[in-house]
Image (cartoon, rainbow, N blue to C red):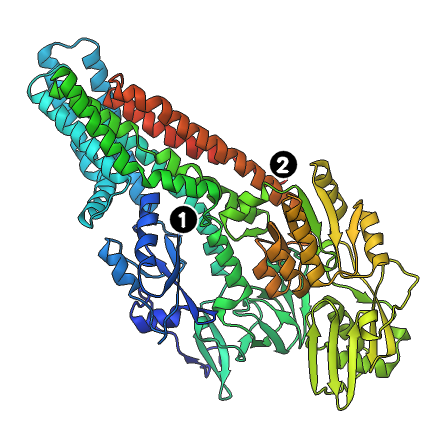
Amino acid sequence: MTCCAPIDVQVALGGAGQPGCSPDEIRLASRDLGDGARQTDLSVPGVHCAACIAAVERTLRKLPGIEAARVNLSMKRVAVTWRSADGAPPDLIGALRGIGYEAHLFAIERDAKDPELARLVKALALAGFCAMNIMMLSVSVWAGADAGTRQAFHLISALLALPALLYSGRIFYASAWSALRHGRTNMDVPISIGVSLAFALSLYDTLHNAPHAYFDAATSLLFFLLIGRTLDHMMRERARSAVAGLARLAPAGATVIRDGRPLYVPVSEVEPGAAVLVAAGERIPVDGVVDQGTSELDCSLVSGETAPRKAAPGEVVQAGVMNLTGPLTVQATARAEDSFLAEMVRMMEAAEGGRARYRRLADRASALYSPVVHTLALLSFMGWLVATGDWHASTTIAIAVLIITCPCALGLAVPIVQVVAARRLFESGIMVKDGSALERLAEIDAVAFDKTGTLTLGKPTLVNANEVAPSALRTALGMTMGSRHPAARAIAEAAAERVGDVPSFDRIDEVPGLGLEARLGDAAYRLGRPEWAAGQWVEDTSAAASISVLARDGEPLATFVLEDRVRREARESVGNLVRQGLTVEVLSGDREAVVKDLASRLGIRDFAAGLLPADKVARVAAHETAGRHLLMVGDGLNDAPALSAAYVSMAPATAADIGRNAADFVFLNESLSAVGDALGISRRSRRLILQNFALAVGYNALAVPVAVLGYVTPLVAAVAMSSSSIIVVANAMRLSPARRAA
């Protein structure tokens, strides 16, 4: 047999091309959210400012069946939630086309090229070259050139300004024209009007040999605006690259077994229950359970740990995990869009999109900008014309007002900080769902930790397995095989090494916060809390151990003693929170002796043990009633209600699906330092946002009256306005990584 022997694998991948946009393709690409609601993600490349966001969201929300529309500016993406009786999607793309925005189904580009950045850099370079040379000529004019030389220099300046206006200015003109053509306005409209008027007035003055012309103002305005826009694009591209990097971890296709034959299909066509073949060296395409084969897995994406983890039949695996040593057959448990990796990508994308208080304030101010600034410029022109009768001076002042009042700095004040913060969190292995969560985290004054899976790794070991009767181990193994609870998995792993012939139960139910309940014929079995399973406490001399009891019809059959390992840096992280003046407590469903011992070792004074899910919610509500802002850190099914009820919440990546969905933040590594890292970044972000607000508002408060009073030329206005945007972007880039002092 040669190395080129054919392999009997059918290829079912379609050709590359633009994602389809027919109603059926939109419906198929939509994600089912339950209760009849679906989410469609569209790419809208033309979105670039707060006015664009408002126009897109407002238009989509007017469509029948639309429940929500949220634009992510960094990803140029809009997530639309809709529902309809017949399952047919609204005409999303047609509605956006009607207001001048082309759209198509969203797909993260795997190509590293960034044509928009190249276009901005070229426009910036040309505008800078023209502005620099025109400024040199202007200096000669200001130095006292005679009338003939002055006019010649002005004519040369006009020729230099033309390519800058036509090539560099088209970025603003195209956006402004698209907005005006569809009966709306955006930030680029007054910029385009200001630049065009400055050039036209300067050309008029040059032809009439006037002493002043403002070609330098027009080109300098474009140059500085493009600096700010390029910096903003680069920061957003860094956020996009993080998302794209995660997305690239998911294979484009997968090999599934259909009718006994391997078939290579797009990963989007892999349905739950499908048997997926994963060769050594490939990444697992969807969440699933290992059905056949043994191997080692690189789970650093999920846990942050680089040590390989063994995989055997029954092991739960997540999308994006690298299969290192041997082939595996994995039974898919979720579609690609519902996988753990897809969830992380969505959280990373959503980090900038939240409408927090500061973001809503900035958006409202930016939305009011165009009508206010146009009115202010018109009133300035009319007022000075009435006062002086000089239309030329009045036009010059109106142009200066038009230019200097652009709220680009205000529009960038919040989102640029959120983009940088999301990147810093991602670098620290922390995912955040939206910007409002980042804002809320900065305001906390109390922290509550769950114990198992949060302060500890949630990987307990059964320490008395050799003391439990084999019959009890078989029963316990049959009950725990399908559970993801850490204690149940520990019992199942220990029992599987010692016994076989697992009984097949008629029914098994998991009761959150209590344990497992199963029926076999007329017998009822319970495994979990001693007082629930057997109606009594079972004492143990080990304060650090957790106790689970197996009982049949209320009669104890066996006692299982489990011990867990504390997360790395747990004591240091708790101490850091206490030093910052935060109240720290433990809320656990475990018995008091275990919780007290752990709290003592970590330096936590306040704790509550034996809590059911409803009890945890009550404790969270008590904090809210007392006026405290609580951060709840927990995992698992029993913590989900408390995570949802807390002011802000965090869960480890190893948490149950419902726990991750309920949390605002998800951290990927085993170290508890992620809590302090996230808190530090959120507080530094809040300071930078407030500084940006102060810079933007202070600039307008000083600049607008000066411009209206006629003390600012168009050149000075261009430099002042553009500089304010650059300062805001540069200030956001000061956000330091995690682990520095907050």
Toward the viewer: 448 or 22? 448
Which residue appears farthest toward the right when viewing the image?
A: 541
Quarter location, residue 521:
bottom right
In the rendered structure, which amino acid carries the disc numbered 2?
Arg
- Asked if residue 189 lies left or right of residue 615, the reply is left
Disc 1 crowd, CA 10 A, few/some/many (<14, 14-19, 20+): many
Observer able to see residue 39: yes
The quadrant of the rendering that contains the C terminus is: top right
Residue at 89% in and 68% down: 538
Q: Can residue 129 be seen in this view?
A: no
Residue 185 coordinates in the image, percent (x, y): 24, 43
For this orientation, the residue located farthest to the left is: 208
Secondary structure under tag 1 reads loop
Residue 103 horizontal/vertical position (percent) = 30, 58
Q: Where is residue 36 in the image (x, y as percent from the top left)?
A: 44, 72
Q: Which amino acid does label 1 sit on?
A: Ser
- Residue drawn at (21%, 39%), measured in percent from left and top? 167
Per the rendering, the mark at residue 740 is 2
- Image position of 678 with respect to 149: above or below: below
Q: Mark 1 points at which residue?
A: 74
Query: Position of 699 compared to 356: left or right?
Result: left
Closer to the camera in the image, 402 or 334? 402
Q: How many labels does the image show?
A: 2
- Name of the residue lying farthest toward the bottom: 521
- Residue 493 is left or right of residue 371, and the answer is right
Please tell me whether mark 2 sits on a helix, a strand or a loop: loop
Q: Which residue is drawn at 14% across and 19% down?
A: 386
